[in-house]
Amino acid sequence: MSNENDERNVDDVAPGFMDSATRSIKAGIRSYLIGLALSVLLTALSFYLVGAHFIWEPGLPAALASLAIAQIGVHLIFFLHITTAPDNTNTVLALAFGVLIVGLIIGGSVWIMAQLHDRVMPIGPLTGMPG
Amino acid sequence: MSILGKLTWDAIPWDQPIPLIAGSVVIAAVLAVVAWVVLTGRLPYLWREWITSVDHKRIGVMYCLLGLLMLLRGFIDAIMMRLQQVLAFHAPGYLPPEHYDQIFSAHGTIMIFFAAMPLVIGLMNFAVPLQLGVRDVAFPTLNSTSLWLTATGALLVNISLVVGEFSRAGWLPYPPLSEIPYTPGVGVDYYLWSLLISGVGTLLTGINFVTTILKTRAPGMSYLRMPMFCWTALASNLLIIAAFPILTATLAMLALDRYLGFHFFTNEAGGNMMMFINLIWAWGHPEVYILVLPAFGIFSEVISTFSGKPLFNYRSMVAATMGICLVSFLVWLHHFFTMGAGPDVNALFGIASAVIAIPTGVKVYNWLFTMYGGRIRFATPMMWAVGFIVTFVIGGMTGVLLATVPADFQLHNSLFLVAHFHNVIIASVLFASFAGLTYWFPKAFGFSLDEGWGKAAFWLTLIGFYAVFIPLYAAGLLGMTRRLQHFDLPIWQPWIRIAAIGILIMGVAALCQVAQLLVSIRRRHELRDMTGDPWDGRSLEWATASPPPAFNFAVLFNVRGEEPYWTIKRRAIAAQRLPVEPRYEAIEMPANSPIGFIVAFFATITGFAMIWHIWWLVGVGLAAAYVVFVWFAWRDVEEYRIPAEEVARIDRARRQARAEWLAELSGSETGVSGTGATALGLDARAAGHGADTPIAGDVAMAGIYATGHGEGGPASKRVIVGYGFWLFLVSDIIMFSAFFAAHAVLQTATAGGPSGRELFNLPSIALQTGCLLASSFTCGLSAVATDTKSQAWTQLSLLITGLLGLAFLTLEVRDFSAMVAQGAEPQRSAFLSSTFTLVGCHGAHVSAGLLWLATMMAQVFVKGFRPNILRRLLCFNLFWHVLDIIWVALFTVVYLVGVLR
């Protein structure tokens, strides 16, 4: 078994682990502070948009989705310290694989079920679905 | 409600002789084995060396044993079904419908989950770390837990034979049949809990093996130097991580329907049973490739070894494997073409299903070209491989036929389909398991299996297989549907009779397998594998002794190309000497642990209590699980040390055997044809380095072992743990995505009840979000504090994180209590069921996080910043930040978009 403190594999870090260049206390706190500020900002914007008639109504879900994706990005970068550096390759690949599967499951399910809904579901008060 | 829930004496089928007698025989056999073990004093040995073992080789052997036992059980079910159909022409047969339905449900469930999966996972367990040239998997104790959780699932299914009943709803319990109104008994509950529990075990295996393969390989073993079986294991375990969370989520939704009256898949209140079929196959089709890819890997190893050639076009094989891995997630709809989707959906999934034949075809040609021009030895594993190629191609072609949507409309649900998937799964998974078992048996036990009985088993299985399933193809084309308890149409009868004869032949083949094992054990001294390389192998598992020592390799190899062992062996033969004895060092190995067995024990109790609604026992089981978790987290000694002298003693014995073999080889070969090396096909230049030029030999053999400087090799423990946990989080996100998908489909199904616009309290949601974001920030600060090794700051920031999490939970519970008070309980509509479940799942994660946090704060306080505690802090950080990410998706989709409707 390998040594506890052995960081021999320089091209390999644990996920969520800041590399030595930014490991100083100040830099660490700064990263989390930026993350907090940005995520609070994006969250506030999302909640604001729902109440205010600021965006064209039908475009609202897309706007909210974009804000959510942006915020997830902020969390990944400033809280989880995911980078594009080579030492992060496996971490990012695992995440990308997960995102692909998530997209296939949700996208595929919605597509398939929407078709089934249009074609085979009974219409009317039985399901409460709009005909 | 009585203290034993629904469990009464009537649960035992006193009036049904078949399960009663079968159950009694099994119980008697189990008791006899237990009595024999205890009376002969073998229990301590069994406990110490096997049950608590975390050695990947022993865990692999136990997985295979479980798989073989369950294979026998599932095969008996198969015989019963064939017998029933033979007898049930214009007659009721000997199995009443409710029993017959249980048999075919149990057959499918057992064969996939408890025969095929354990066999494949067992072989991966045994061979992958050896092939990678390392000493164990990434998480040895977790590995043992996976094994015992799988065993729990198998045990629960088998308990259903005598206590209560098994599911009658098929191997995938399609609603609404599997819902309470149509199947009120415990059968489906047995199915649900055995799979929910064993599914956790399988997921942990997936995480363990992906981490092992990506993070712990021998020095110098780059991705493109890994043996093919490791590549296929990687693809298969990636699919486990991607697919099993979907299964867990889907079965959890069905369980909520059945236990709490939710409406995910019901007929009432907006439930959508087609969503179950959609989700279960989003797991189900990748599952096929989880089984079949390692089978391809085994055949690649076997065909290359017994053809005496490197695998033809290795890189295209890697590409084909990963291609199948990806495309396998794009074909699930072909299991329900007939459900009513439009031509565009059906066409896309049909084409994707046909496309998967292309990388598979690449593989078939690669195997053929590996054999072409090779010096093929038809040992038993190779027989299975050749039988596989021929049989699998037939199954594959009927698969492409079924991928054609109009053809599928005719053949759907017929025996043609049954014949097709048995054709592919038996030819690949079963044949590969037998090939793999025969191939690696000498490595595991130190002696080979008897070839005569092995070949008899092969030929009888092959003939029996065709005799069973070709007639089923024919009967299917004649319109016979699957799962018929009796039938009246005379044109099907001859085919059903031939199939019955076929299964008798397969039964004789099964007896041959048993005989093979018994005869081989009797003849073990003649069949002994002295050198550790009985098949003239090419990958690293053959470099060590048979059976391998606990530490696998005394010194890790420094891999410098594909087929590292083949290179080492050739060089040793050319130089007519072994590599210089390496410098032995003490080796630390993971200590055995009963944790896996104990966890599984409580999982069995909890599962059984859930099935029979014995709620107090569920509480006991869950509390015990938490106690075990804390107890395990508190242990100090994780490893034991094998001293260098012991390592040297063991390895010198291996070297002695190798040296004798080498001397024998060069002696005999030199006598026949001058230089042994040329006889073995080496080029003249290599052969020139004879025994008389030891210096040249030393040069040729230098650098075989890793020196531990700058050659890569297994990553540090922190990286391994962090990466493994990251994979777990990815799987968790995928599980959430199944709940998100259900919510997306069901969000409009309010069934006349309240919608999100009337229910959601956005200011409170904003406050909850604020709490979580702030807690993520303080959690981050705790990581900084940990870096500075400041106990006070770490504890303070963790405490604030916990309090913020608690505030979040309190607000959330308050909101949901208010909703229930307004009459918007989850039983009201499918929309509310999915909302409560999705948000509740996140809330359950936060609650679990808080328990974990409290435990860890105590640990940091008592033990300080030890490396293992630092690793856990890292994992907790990842967990907490990912919960935040899920919440961002959740508040947007559920609440913000929810109030727009």
Image: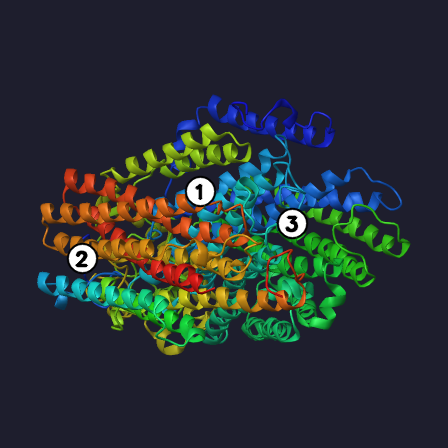
Do badges 3 and 2 share one subunit? no
The kind of residue tagged 3 is Pro
- Chain for mark 1? B
| Residues at marks 1 and 2, CA–CA distance in whole angstroms | 56 Å
Helix, strand or loop at label 3? It is loop
Q: Residue at x 20, y 39 (%)?
A: B858
Q: Residues within 10 Å of mark 3 (few under 14, many from 20)?
A: many
Q: Is residue B22 visible?
A: yes
| Labels 3, 1: front one | 1
Instruction: Find residue B251 and report its horizontal and vertical position in percent.
Output: 53, 49
Residues under labels 3 and 2: Cα distance? 56 Å
> Left or right: A57 with respect to A1?
right
Q: Which residue is mark 1?
A: B821
Above or below, comparing residue B568 to residue B547 in the picture: below
Chain label for disc 3: B
Question: Looking at the image, is mark 3 or mark 1 earlier in the sequence?
Answer: 3
- Disc ID at residue A6: 2
Residue toward you, A96 or B379 = A96
On screen, B847 above or below A107?
A: above
Q: Nearer the viewer, residue B803 or B21?
A: B803
Q: Which residue is mark 3?
A: B176
Q: Identify the chain of the residue marked 2, using the numbered disc in the image.
A: A
Q: Nearer the viewer, mark 1 or mark 2?
A: 1
Real-space CA distance between mark 3 and mark 1, rounded to the nearest whole angstrom = 29 Å
- Please give the name of the residue rendered at 84% of the width and 40% of the height, measured from the top-left corner: B92
Disc 1 residue crowd, few under 14, some 14–19, many 20+, Cα 10 Å = few
Depth check: B80 or A39 in front? A39
